[in-house]
Image: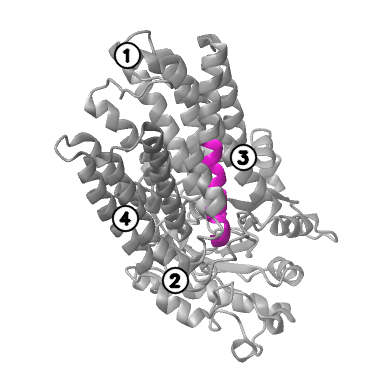
Amino acid sequence: MLSAGYGLIFARPLSGRIVRRWALVILPLLQAMSAALLAWSALPQHTLKSLLVVFWGMEWLVWFVRFVRSGALARELDAYPGLVVALMVLSWLAGWFVATFVPWADYLSAVIMLLLSSLLATRLNLRFESSGPEAVPEKAPRLWRIVPDLRLSSGRDVREALALVLGGALFGVISGMNWQAHGTNYGFGFDQQDQLNLPLPMYVLPWLIGLVPVIVANHPVRVSGWLPYLAWCSLVALGLQAPGKSAVGEWGFVILQSTGWCAMLAILSRLIALCPPSSVAGWLALANTAICGAACLGGWLGREYGVSAWAEFLFVAGAALAIQIYWLREWMELTAAPLAWLIYRIRHVGPGHPWVPWRGPLIVLANHAAWFDPLWLGKVIPRRLTPMMTSVFYDLPGLYWLMRYVLRVIRVQASAARQEVPELEEAVARLDQGECLVIFPEARLRREEHRLLAHFQRGIWLLLQKRPETQVVPCWIEGNWGSFFSWRGGPPMKGKLFDWGRTITIVIGEPLVVSSEALADHRTTRRFLEQTVLSLRQVLDNPDKTSPPLAQHLAKSGPDESGLSEENALGSHEAPNDREA
């Protein structure tokens, strides 16, 4: 608990880029020195315990420093934060594994592997250090300003971050109560220092299982969908923990520890994508401290009040139900992902995928040729999407509750001509909350074989008029025309074969901001966005084209927070003013 709390004190001082360069080298050296003293010194017992706290305190601080840059590292690798979290976990786990299970190495192997794994992680961090939209301050704030930076871009992000911290605390309480109530049966208790009396594979298995969510659900938002599954698995684990050292009880203990480790990594991965670089360390420190504190609280409750098995079961059931309700959308999307993988082959190309902003207001524009276009976009866009749906489908009895309360879709009244457009005001309000809107400016499904893209309607221009600073990500969806849910060969879902094994390719362009000069005329804006979306089809001729390197992207982006190049922002020199919509 004390070691995790170090992060709250040093999160802000260690956030500067220059400070992190030496911290990633000095902190592991201090760890190695403390490990050597623990191994070979004849210091009093209380001093050795203090050194152990220092050792793990240094470990927490190194993790915080590494995670600050994981957002930019993930973008450069064209991967989501989960893979970077897994990479850093493996670099540390290698040293821990050798130090724990190689008898002849003991503390010497701990020192050597600690330095080697730290060198690997340090190399990864320094290799991708740069300025730009994912950078943190060049110099750390003054040391006496030790309050961690917890500022987020919107109130919705704050609520999500607090929910993640609270969810981690619930898993911590469950783990702590289980250690106290059942750990003594396995040779371990809160007042003992014996190791678990488990076979080696069962001791290592929770660590490896913990990496599964952040690798399989490689999505910065959808990874939260694992939390309900993990909470219900905790109930199963409690049922398997029979008294004594039976094989069933051992597996119950392993499952429970695996769910806790899975939840922790999933929460860390989500926080990395949710928080700006300057506040990542602060929120990670808060989350880790809350999880460790909750584990201690759960153990204390079990020891002082003798929490019964039924009380523990009811607590876990209530926590699982609360987690299921809060992350219901992410759970549904994660559950549907394997089914979508069996039916469709969804892939993304284009230069814009690594640069889709993870935070803040955003508009995704795309062509519209099939009913499932929003679902296919949600597979490759690393955001929680907010689509707009016509009232013809929105008001259906089987979809209304889901669309309004779970997916929070914006309802568009189906009408040929209207004087009032309430959905526009709602869309503006959603952007102000930092959401990502999915808009199909054609306002209808594609009907003609020869016409790839219909003229964009005025809605996108009206929206950008109200929020002109909003970034726009253009996309082109290829393979939707001719699918089971398109108008090719007849109305959707009629007279055509189902889409088994169909390939859907989504071309993602770089984010852009339409200039104020272009927004002055709705025809200019609409024509420009049409050409931008349609031009992305050219990428299909070269599908292996990768995104530009980080240094190249930042060189043309400049130091501004938007990270947008002048070529991407529509200027008067390239506005097609001589064209009519």
When the figure is inspected, residue 515 is found, relative to residue 307, above or below; the finding is: below
Q: Earlier in the sequence, mark 4 or mark 3?
A: 4
Q: How many marks?
A: 4
Residue 309 or 103: which is nearer the viewer?
103
The residue stretch that appears in magenta: 274-291
User: Could you classify mark 3 by the number of other residues whose Cα lies within 10 Å: few (under 14), some (14-19), or many (20 or more)?
Assistant: some
The image quadrant that residue 527 belongs to is bottom right
Badge 2 is on which residue? 537
Marks 4 and 3: CB-CB under 8 Å? no
- Left or right for 280, reference 468: left
Foreground tag (4 vs 1):
4
Is residue 336 in view from this perspective?
A: no
Foreground tag (4 vs 2):
4
When the figure is inspected, residue 65 is found, relative to residue 394, above or below; the finding is: below
Distance between mark 4 and mark 2 Cα atoms: 44 Å
When the figure is inspected, residue 105 is found, relative to residue 282, above or below; the finding is: above
- Residue 288, magenta (yes or no): yes
x, y (%) of residue 242?
38, 9
Badge 3 is on which residue? 163
Measuring 36% from the left and 70% from the top, which residue is drawn there?
A: 546
x, y (%) of residue 70?
44, 58
Badge 4 is on which residue? 118
Q: Secondary structure at mark 1?
A: helix
Residue type at tag 1: Val
Distance between mark 3 and mark 2 Cα atoms: 40 Å
x, y (%) of residue 375?
52, 49
Badge 1 is on which residue? 248
